[in-house]
Amino acid sequence: MEDWIRIFGLLLTAGILCLLLRRTGPEFGTAAAVAGCLAGTLLLLKLCSPLLEFVRALSAQTGIDRRFLAPVLKSVGIGALTQFTAAFCEDCGQATLAKVAVTGGTVLVLCVCLPLFQAVLSLTAALSGG
Amino acid sequence: MEIDLIFKIAAVGIIISILNQVLVRTGREEQATMTTLAGLVVVLMIVVQRIAELFGLVKELFHF
């Protein structure tokens, strides 16, 4: 609970400082916003680590192959980084860069999930006797 | 402490803004631009270190 309060406090402080800095120097306002986002994301990801450990333990107990779990976790990581990068680019007023970041993230997720698609394809072929 | 990062950037921004105003009022626009640029580079250096930290954490957490 204290961690959440700390994150909310940090984000609120960053927002107020951004408002203050945008009047005098817009580039420093954007930098402060990015720093606030970074600090918040770092704290959030540190909070998420027990959750990820639980998912890994659950997959080990249920006997799910690590080959199939790894792309899912990697996709979550790529999604988080893509969202952060796209939001940063949009804050800087560069919507095109944000769209490129989103497209890059999508392509990267598809590449990471390729072994899953191949496994589904081979399973379907085996079931249909091909 | 994470909040120190934001306060550090805000402090640099405020100092650079004051310096910028003083230099512009005294008719030294080129120096004002250079000061702003230097401040921006300093801030970017701080932010880039944290971005590297974030990417490292994501790599570690999601087993890249």
Image (tube, helix red, strand yellow):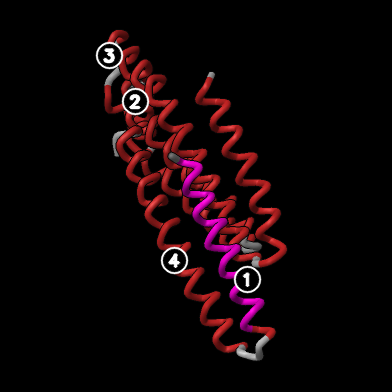
**Dot 3 corresponds to which residue?**
A60
- The three-letter amino acid code for the residue at tag 2 is Leu
Which secondary structure, mark 4?
Answer: helix
Chain that bears disc 3: A
Q: How many C-alpha atoms fall within 10 Å of the one at disc 1: few (<14), some, or many (≥20)?
A: few
Measured in 3D between alpha carbons, the distance from the residue under mark 3 to the one under mark 4, in whole angstroms, is 46 Å
Name the foreground residue: A45 vs A72.
A45
- The three-letter amino acid code for the residue at tag 1 is Ile
> Would you say the residues marked 3 and 4 are in contact, meaning their CB atoms lie under 8 Å apart?
no
Occupied quadrant, residue A90: bottom right
Magenta span = B2-23
Occupied quadrant, residue A45: top left
Which secondary structure, mark 2?
Answer: helix
Q: Residue at x 59, y 51 (%)?
A: A33
**Dot 4 corresponds to which residue?**
B42
**Dot 2 corresponds to which residue?**
A69
| In the rendered image, the vertical position of residue B55 relative to residue A71, given as above or below | below
